[in-house]
Amino acid sequence: MREKSAVMPAQSKGAPPSGELRGDMAGAGQATGTGACDAGIVCRSLNKKYGSIFALRDVSLSAPRGCFASIIGRSGAGKSTLLEAIAGLLDPDGGDIELAGRTVFSAACRIPPHKRNVGMVFEDLGLWNHLTVRKHVELPTRKRGGADGASAADEIIAGLDLKEVAGRRPGELSAGQRRRCAIARALACRPEILLLDEPLGEFDPPGRRAVGRLIRQWHERLALTTLMVTHHVEDALGLSDYIAVMDSGAILQSGAPEEVHSRPSCEAVASLLDADFPQGGTRRD
Ligand code: ATP
């Protein structure tokens, strides 16, 4: 039931994507990329194997510029591997990746992580123990240059409710505050692409909703293309324009959240989404 090309259609709830990407990728993605102005994240036929385990198995997905997409899957499904491949932290064994219309990985090309214009919040947050929250946010804004550096940092710090703890170092923060600090740092880089690995992991349900809303607001405000990995179905369904369900390294189904949830293509997707898959139900494959 695995979809060979997981296409995330562009029409959905209030997202600003500017067009629809088609599943037929034939002929696209030469070394310079398709240059398509509506391309946010495009992965084609990504594979990654560790010994006999496929961490990624022929993964193709297409997220239009400006969309908020989520990958849902159980532990070991390959979600983090996919994010790391997009960020450039690991090289797939094959396939290619295009970000904002530019090929960043293919047989002919490998753009290093710091040149991909990607903001990342990974599960181990990678905060700097010697720096305060403010410094975490100021450093990227200064690095980007521009007169608005300090005020942009202030705005992000306030926006993520970190004002009270802006002078503290990571060791003096709660787990949730550390997570928000990492999100603030990623936003301060003003990336085109934002990759989030379980960004709501530390929060209780009200916290999850509040921080989820904040992330979505900043996603829209900065016109980002965001890809979030989560185990939590509610977060994915509530925040995303598109979702893709992964298992055993492969994408099982993708599409608008309501559609995937109401019409799961197989029992595995239904089970992962806690959705109904009645006997005799309609399969989409
Ligand atoms: P989780 O939700 O638990 O973080 P995940 O969906 O992000 O899981 P991945 O971390 O992408 O899963 O791992 C996918 C598969 O690849 C798993 O079977 C994992 O054990 C394996 N794997 C990942 N990294 C390595 C590695 N460096 N060496 C060997 N196997 C690996």
Image (cartoon, rainbow, N blue to C red):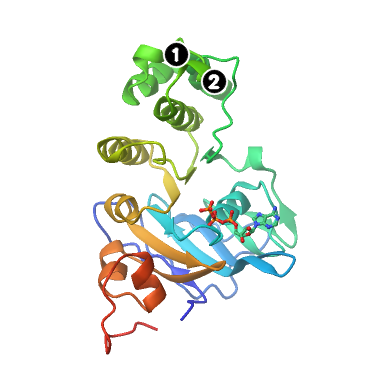
Which residue is disc 2 drawn over? 145
Residue 158 figure quarter: top left
Measured as percent of width and height from the top left, residue 216 is found at 32, 41
Measured as percent of width and height from the top left, residue 34 is found at 57, 61
Measured as percent of width and height from the top left, residue 88 is found at 65, 48
Q: Nearer the viewer, mark 1 or mark 2?
A: 1
Tell me the crowding category of disc 1: few under 14, some 14 to 19, or many 20 or more residues within 10 angstroms, Cα based. some
| Picture layout, residue 33 above or below residue 190 | below
Tell me the crowding category of disc 2: few under 14, some 14 to 19, or many 20 or more residues within 10 angstroms, Cα based. few
| Picture layout, residue 38 above or below residue 277 | above
Q: Earlier in the sequence, mark 1 or mark 2?
A: 2
Label 1 secondary element? helix
User: Can you tell me which quadrant of the image ligand 1 is in?
Assistant: bottom right
From mark 1 to mark 2, how far is it between C-alphas?
A: 10 Å
Give the residue drawn at x 58%, y 22%.
Answer: 143
Q: Is residue 91 left or right of residue 24?
A: right
Of residues 37 and 122, which is closer to you in this image? 122
Which residue is disc 1 drawn over? 150
Mark 1: amino acid: Ala
Give the residue drawn at x 60%, y 49%.
Answer: 84
Quadrant of the frame with the C terminus: bottom left
Give the residue drawn at x 55%, y 57%.
Answer: 35
